[in-house]
Image (cartoon, grey):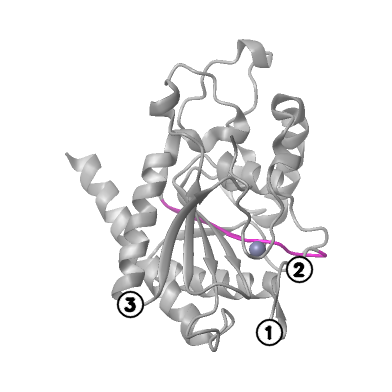
């Protein structure tokens, strides 16, 4: 059974977007190409073939191979956008707070020589759909994807990983639907979630970890987490607070830096 968990900002349950699996796949592939040209027109990945595009009919599809990951690429998804404002937090809309955090985090990561891709740059109308965001992200072969939300309720930083079962639990020979691509990365995603939680705790930030079914996390082909900033200090400091955002962004950047170092160390072994 799928969890009925919703994010505190009220993000829609993914089932409405992902219920038809293969049927929507070709349509999604066409859509993602337009998104890629929209968010990163000069990037080399724009010429690449969609990683999940069926080679034959879906029934003959082999299990998708895990794409080679570029340890320098980080994908950030500032959730919502356009007419989808997300939650109302103080005097601001969530979509704008998510973008503030993404922009702050991008600067920190670029200073550490990461190549940062945003799935929404600015506030386009309409904003990319969850399907389009997942499709675009999966073209980038990123080391990590981070989806950013914020909310007016709760306390502290909530880190979510997909609630899908890991591929090792379901059998590696099973065909993985594109909308469940995260199954191959669950364990890495949970390890990343733990690392970030440790970093935030060292920064004296209230933190919790959870798992949920949510778009576009379930469809991402890389280690992926969703971060939702709630108020802190009993509601007196909102996610729009620059000091709060900086503390969280510092923790994320430090975690990703160590993540990259660990990946390099594994390669050398
Ligand atoms: Zn949200």
- Residue density around tag 2, few if under 14, some if 14–19, many if 20 or more, within 10 Å: some
- Some atom of ligand 1 lies within 8 Å of the CB belonging to the residue at label 3: no
Where's residue 208, x and y in %?
42, 63
> Any magenta on residue 80?
yes
Q: Nearer the viewer, residue 139 or 188?
A: 188
Secondary element at tag 2: loop
Judge from the rendering whether residue 74 lies leftward or rightward of residue 61; answer left or right.
left
> In which of the image's four quarters is ligand 1 placed?
bottom right
Which of the two discs, 2 and 3, labels the residue nearer the N terminus? 2
Residue bearing the label numbered 2: 85
Q: Is residue 23 left or right of residue 104?
A: right
Q: State the SS at label 3.
A: loop
Query: How far is the residue under mark 1 from the one under mark 3?
Result: 24 Å
**Where residue 117 appears, x then y in whole percent?**
56, 57
Would residue 139 be visible to someone looking at this image? no
Q: Is mark 2 within 8 Å of ligand 1?
A: no
**Residue 90: mark in rendering:** 1
Q: Mark 1 or mark 3: which comes first in sequence?
A: 1
* Point 69% across, 48% down: residue: 13
Numbered range of the magenta stretch:
72-83
Query: Which quadrant of the figure contains the C terminus?
Result: top left
Give the Cα distance between marks 1 and 2.
Answer: 13 Å
Badge nearest the viewer, 1 or 2: 1
Quadrant of the snapshot with the N terminus: top right
């Amino acid at each position: 059974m799928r969890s009925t968990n919703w994010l505190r900002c009220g993000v829609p349950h993914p089932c409405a977007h992902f219920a038809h699996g293969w049927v929507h796949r070709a349509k999604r592939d066409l859509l993602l190409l337009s998104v890629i040209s929209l968010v990163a027109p000069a990037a080399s990945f724009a010429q690449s073939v969609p990683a999940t595009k069926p080679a034959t009919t879906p029934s003959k599809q082999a299990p998708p191979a895990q794409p080679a990951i570029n340890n320098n690429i980080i994908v950030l998804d500032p959730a919502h956008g356009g007419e989808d404002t997300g939650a109302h937090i103080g005097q601001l809309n969530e979509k704008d707070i998510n973008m503030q955090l993404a922009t702050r985090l991008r600067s920190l990561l670029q200073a550490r020589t990461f190549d940062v891709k945003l799935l929404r740059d600015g506030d386009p109308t309409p904003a990319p759909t969850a399907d389009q965001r997942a499709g675009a992200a999966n073209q980038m072969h990123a080391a990590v994807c981070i989806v950013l939300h914020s909310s007016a309720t709760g306390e502290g930083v909530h880190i979510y990983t997909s609630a899908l079962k890991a591929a090792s639990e379901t059998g590696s020979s099973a065909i993985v639907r594109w909308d469940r691509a995260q199954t191959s990365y669950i364990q890495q995603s949970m390890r990343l979630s733990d690392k970030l939680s440790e970093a935030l705790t060292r920064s004296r930030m209230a933190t919790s970890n959870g798992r949920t079914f949510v778009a576009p996390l379930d469809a991402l082909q890389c280690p992926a987490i969703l971060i939702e900033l709630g108020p802190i200090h009993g509601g007196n400091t909102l996610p729009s607070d620059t000091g709060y955002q900086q503390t969280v962004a510092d923790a994320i950047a430090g975690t990703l830096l160590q993540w990259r170092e660990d990946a390099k160390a594994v390669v050398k072994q």
